[in-house]
């Protein structure tokens, strides 16, 4: 089952497998339920009787929901972070530690969706997209599904000092999520393919792929740490880190087109003009 949030002439609506859900349905409402209750509710719905081709995909993150992210969960990410930073030991230590790196990325109202523009910071000269499996988690910290995420980042700012991480990671246009939410359990995500391609002036400037089987940590471990001392009554989205990092010679440019594919979900975003 796949959930999508769309914009229609009648306002924002949710669909399930292409069928329009009742008008008052919200993701916050669904993620306020246990996974079993949510699944039972959605299975009562017959999408074939409510099919629609109308509406434009929006980010599935509702305005009041939060997006968090995990860092250095793949060996490739550790290597690149060490290479860019004067404090390389920080990344080696967190990669091996029991406690993962977790950081706040964005609120829903600051998150963009499929076909919307992402941005690079004007005060940074080295910027990259980070394609990530993004977990959808309910208030009980149960994984209910996944979507695709782009954790757009400034490598020059983070590399200058790890304490600058919030500025490197969180700014207007730095978080893209969507378009659809594939409903499934965490066990079905352990070998998901992740792919990114970046088009520049009609040709591929960068392309890479990874697999969630390469992750250092389990998805359940990341979720458990996120929920240790915080509650999320409206549910939460968690980006799980990237295994694809372009080399030092690459930086995102205005008008680039970034395509990220995670499992069944494909997320496309142009880079805004400066």
Image: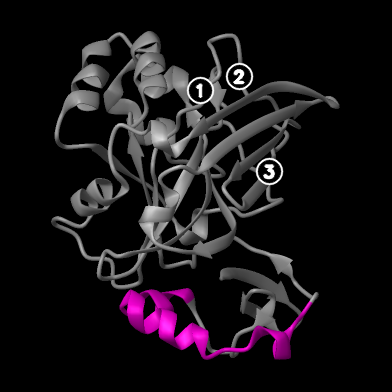
Image check: 215 left or right of 131?
Answer: left
Q: Which mark, residue 245?
A: 1
Mark 3 — residue? Answer: 269
Q: Is mark 1 on a helix, strand or loop?
A: loop
Mark 2 — residue? Answer: 251
Q: Which residue is drawn at 58% across and 55% down?
A: 178
User: What whole-number distance in Å separates the C-alpha atoms at marks 3 and 1?
Assistant: 17 Å
Dot 3, crowdedness within 10 Å: few (<14), some or many (≥20)? many
Q: Quadrant of residue 85?
A: top left
Mark closer to the observer (3, 1): 1
| Tags 1 and 2 touching, CB below 8 Å | no
First to last magenta residue range = 27-52
**Residue sitting nearer the eye, 41 or 112:** 41
| Tags 3 and 1 touching, CB below 8 Å | no
- Position of 108 relative to 32 (above/below): above
Percent position (x, y) of residue 35? 34, 75
Dot 2, crowdedness within 10 Å: few (<14), some or many (≥20)? some
Sequence-wise, the earlier of marks 2 and 3 is 2
User: What whole-number distance in Å separates the C-alpha atoms at marks 1 and 2?
Assistant: 11 Å
Q: In which quarter of the image is residue 73?
A: top left
Percent position (x, y) of residue 114? 66, 53
Percent position (x, y) of residue 150? 53, 41
Judged by its main secondary structure, the magenta piece is helix
Sequence-wise, the earlier of marks 3 and 1 is 1
Q: Is mark 2 on a helix, strand or loop?
A: loop
Sequence-wise, the earlier of marks 1 and 2 is 1
């Amino acid at each position: 089952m796949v959930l999508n949030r769309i914009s229609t002439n009648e306002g924002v609506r949710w669909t399930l497998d292409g069928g329009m859900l009742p008008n008052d349905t919200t993701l916050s409402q669904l993620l306020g339920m246990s996974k079993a209750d949510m699944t039972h509710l959605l299975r009562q719905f017959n999408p074939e009787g409510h099919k629609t081709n109308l509406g434009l995909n929006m980010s599935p993150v509702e305005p009041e929901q939060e997006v968090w992210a995990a860092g250095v969960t793949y060996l490739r990410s550790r290597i690149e972070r060490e290479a860019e930073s004067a404090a390389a030991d920080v990344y080696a230590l967190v990669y091996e530690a029991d406690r993962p790196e977790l950081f706040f990325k964005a609120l829903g109202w600051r998150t963009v969706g499929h076909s919307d523009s992402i941005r690079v910071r004007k005060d940074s000269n080295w910027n990259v997209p980070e394609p990530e499996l993004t977990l959808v988690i309910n208030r009980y910290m149960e994984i209910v599904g996944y979507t695709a995420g782009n954790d757009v980042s400034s490598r020059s700012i983070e590399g200058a000092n790890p304490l600058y991480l919030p500025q490197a990671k969180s700014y207007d246009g730095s978080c893209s999520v969507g378009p659809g939410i594939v409903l499934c359990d965490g066990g079905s995500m352990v070998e998901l393919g992740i792919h990114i391609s970046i088009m520049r002036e009609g040709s591929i400037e960068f392309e890479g792929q990874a697999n969630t089987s390469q992750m250092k940590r389990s998805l359940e471990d990341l979720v458990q740490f996120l929920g240790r001392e915080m509650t999320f009554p409206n549910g939460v989205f968690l980006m799980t880190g990237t295994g694809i990092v372009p080399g030092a010679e690459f930086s995102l440019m205005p008008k680039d087109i970034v395509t990220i594919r995670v499992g069944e979900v494909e997320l496309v975003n142009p880079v805004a003009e400066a």
